Amino acid sequence: MIALPTNKDENWRYANLRPLAKAKADAVAAEAATHAAITLPAALPGYERWVFVDGRFAADLSAPAPDSCAALLNARDAGEDFSAMLDAAIATEGADLALARVNGTRGDQVLHIAPPDGAEANIELTFIASAGAATGTSYPRVQVHAGRGAHLRIVERHLSSGSADSAINAAFDLALRADATIDHCRLQNFADAASAYDTLLAHVGERATYRLRTITLGGLASRSTILVKLAGRAARCELTAGSIANGIQTHDVFAEIEHSNADTVTRELYRGIATDRGKLGFNGKMIVRESAPGADSDQSLKTLLTGTGAEASIRPQLEIYTDKVRAKHGATTGKLDEQMLFYLLSRGIDRRTAQTLLQWAFIEDVISRMDCAPLRVEIELLVAAQLNEVSALEGLLGP
Amino acid sequence: MTAATPLLEISNLSAKVGGKNVLHGLSLTVNAGEVHAIMGPNGSGKSTLAYVLAGRPGYEITGGGVKFQGRDLLTMEPEERARAGMFLGFQYPVEIPGVNNVYLLKAAVNAKRKATGQPEVDAYEFLQLVRGKMKLMQMDESFLSRGVNEGFSGGEKKRNEILQMLVLEPALAVLDETDSGLDIDALKVVARGVNSLRAADRGVLLITHYQRLLDHIVPDQVHVLARGRIARSGDKSLAHELEKRGYDWVLEVA
């Protein structure tokens, strides 16, 4: 039995782990999933579609390309080749990988995406949760292996069908060969009662670029563990994460980016809004090894608290073992800017709309970076709904 | 409001900011159709007066009152003042990335229309109106889709303030050092914008440190603000006299 992380573990202090401990650990049974009631977002033009319900592939809802570079594998057949590629140092990080290991032992399906050298592919992954936690846990698992110079675009959504207290433990492993690019946009908008945990490992090769843009809106508890290794010379990671925690939601992220080769670059941006009694955690750790002269990292972490009971914990951390490095970091937690608020009021805009607008402006940094236009529009509407003010923001939404 | 009711009537106004008394019994009346210039040295209370009129938080009224179109201005929220026709052109307009200019303009116009029971502005007509005003202000159309004042130069920000004023068509525009930081060409553009708004039913309160703006926007009256009250009032020749003799002259007399 794999020991689950607890709040005593260094990188897990802020996570809400209770729902996971209470959920039935077995995978949701295949027959529990009914697809009739599921409404999917419109298909994205130019993207092949892979839909999973409670962690299992739903062929009836999917539309893979005939010559797809993605294939569904049995968990036991997958991963050996892949895990050999992962750096041993990452693979031994105890508590941080515990959930991914649980996923590996409990889940039975793996989506393997492997665009060959020089290929381009656009893949939409939509994970629907419908079963309650008492029925079992969903274990989505995706492995990505981008060949040399390949360009892969992934749009990944996590949504609920219904309002069940689903428990999800997802695992993503990505490897980018030299000169590969992955543009990865992720949306988590589960039902309020759901709890979502995910682990993402990325191994970025020489001159390869991994862009991850995530936005977290749903779930009672949400925890993302992101471990990126910039392994090849001039490897680059752009991580943009946004979160809005309302009510009693807890959204927590641990992101560790390790620069282990020369001239590696990180751009990290986090914007979180906590309203009501929402809680946000973002722990951004940058490691620059001795083997990474010329590394360049930029970290901008900001949270906005608008509720009287709202909380945020943001921790920028730098561990630098070489002198030849450029590392910039900034972290702020604050309330709405009074000057901006007064400016809007002085133009006749009512207070509630002005406050919503400023929250919108704050999170817009993240939304604008979602480079898949239809997804961006979808996210804009969801964000407006999360801010409880769709009508006020109408003029700002759309392509 | 009857024809005889002044647009703005400030009586014996005293105000504090940050625990410090800044306005000491200031009185001033602006009638519809008039442009008044308020000049004065730094720290005389010019910006405080502008902020008090617009309702910025943090300013405590310790005495006197202000009537706007006959209504008690000081009990109104900042957004109510704006909808009633008060406009503040900021000395330092803030940047609001993520909210674009066209959205702000439209939201502001609709807030005002809603307050007076009018339907929302037609999107096409609105855009035509804004484009016309932008042309007057020599602003590129790309401004519309940019974030409010985001990355604007000092001059662009001031032009944007005047553009907002032209679109909102306020009954009273309070322009707080709109001329500061402008080169002569930009100053002329801003002046043209302000002059285009002059009308029998409107008033302008022009707060400025320098006389040069008044060559382009000719005021009906000039007031010198010193130590929190009006120290001297006159016609436009007072501005020229100040330019020649400096503020010390007024301070000595006051």
Image (cartoon, coloured by chain):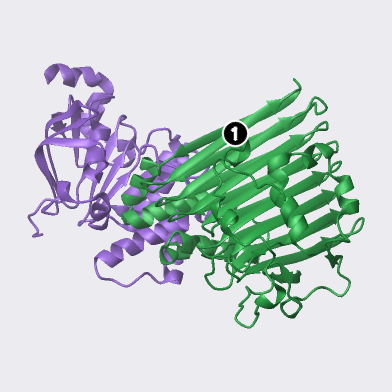
Chain colours: A green, B purple
Amino acid type indicated by mark 1: Pro
Looking at the image, which residue is at 54% across and 52% down?
A18
In the rendered image, which residue does mark 1 sit on? Answer: A316
- Rendered location of residue B41, percent (x, y): 26, 24
Give x and y (percent) for residue B237.
21, 32
Q: Looking at the image, which is closer to me, A225 or B151?
A: A225
Q: Is residue B203 left or right of residue A111?
A: left
Q: Above or below — where is A82 with respect to B25?
A: below
Residue under the point 9% across and 58% down: B3
The residue sitting at 25% across, 45% down in the picture is: B54
Residue A272 vertical placement versus B208 (above, below)? below
Give the residue at x 83% y 31%: A262
Q: Looking at this rendering, what residue extends furthest in the front direction?
A: A1
At label 1, counting other C-alpha atoms closer than 10 Å, the crowd grade (few under 14, some 14-19, many 20 or more) is some
Depth order, front residue of A201/A125: A201
Q: Is residue A149 left or right of residue A365?
A: right
Estimate the x, y position of residue A155 in percent, counting from the top left: 70, 62
Q: How many marks?
A: 1
Q: Is residue B188 at least partly visible in the picture?
A: yes
